Amino acid sequence: MLYGENISEAAIRLGTASRIFYMAGKIPLRLDIEPIKKNPDYFIRRYIQYAEEELCSKTIV
């Protein structure tokens, strides 16, 4: 893809979902992780939900 060409919505959504998963791994390094240790299922489900919503076109591009 050359600079200035239109990027497809699917490519935008895939990139956003990839960044969500990337950030899910980085956030515990910067925040107090005690709440995550106590309830890891909630943390994991929340980020999977964000990525699913992005990939299923439930968010606005």
Image (tube, helix red, strand yellow):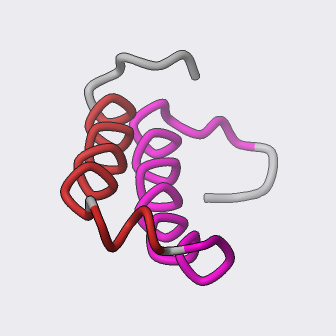
Residue shown at the point (45%, 45%) measured from the top left: 11
Can you say which quadrant of the picture contains the N terminus? bottom right
Residue shown at the point (51%, 48%) measured from the top left: 16
- Asked where in the image residue 7 lies, by quadrant, the reply is top right
Residue shown at the point (26%, 49%) measured from the top left: 42
Can you say which quadrant of the picture contains the C terminus? top right
Tell me, yes or no, whether the highlighted magenta stretch contains residue 54.
no
Give the residues in magenta.
5-32
**Furthest residue toward bottom:** 29
| Residue 27 sits above or below residue 49 on the image | below
Taking the image as shown, residue 3 lies to the left or right of residue 21, namely right
Tell me, yes or no, whether the highlighted magenta stretch contains residue 22.
yes
In percent of width and height, residue 14 lies at 40, 49
In percent of width and height, residue 38 lies at 29, 66
In percent of width and height, residue 52 lies at 26, 37
Q: Nearer the viewer, residue 9 or 55?
A: 55
**Furthest residue toward right:** 4
Q: Nearer the viewer, residue 50 or 29?
A: 29
Q: Nearer the viewer, residue 2 or 55?
A: 55
In percent of width and height, residue 48 lies at 27, 48
- Asked where in the image residue 23 lies, by quadrant, the reply is bottom right
Q: How many labels sit on residues?
A: 0
Residue shown at the point (79%, 55%) measured from the top left: 3
Q: Nearer the viewer, residue 2 or 20?
A: 20
Overall secondary structure of the magenta section: helix
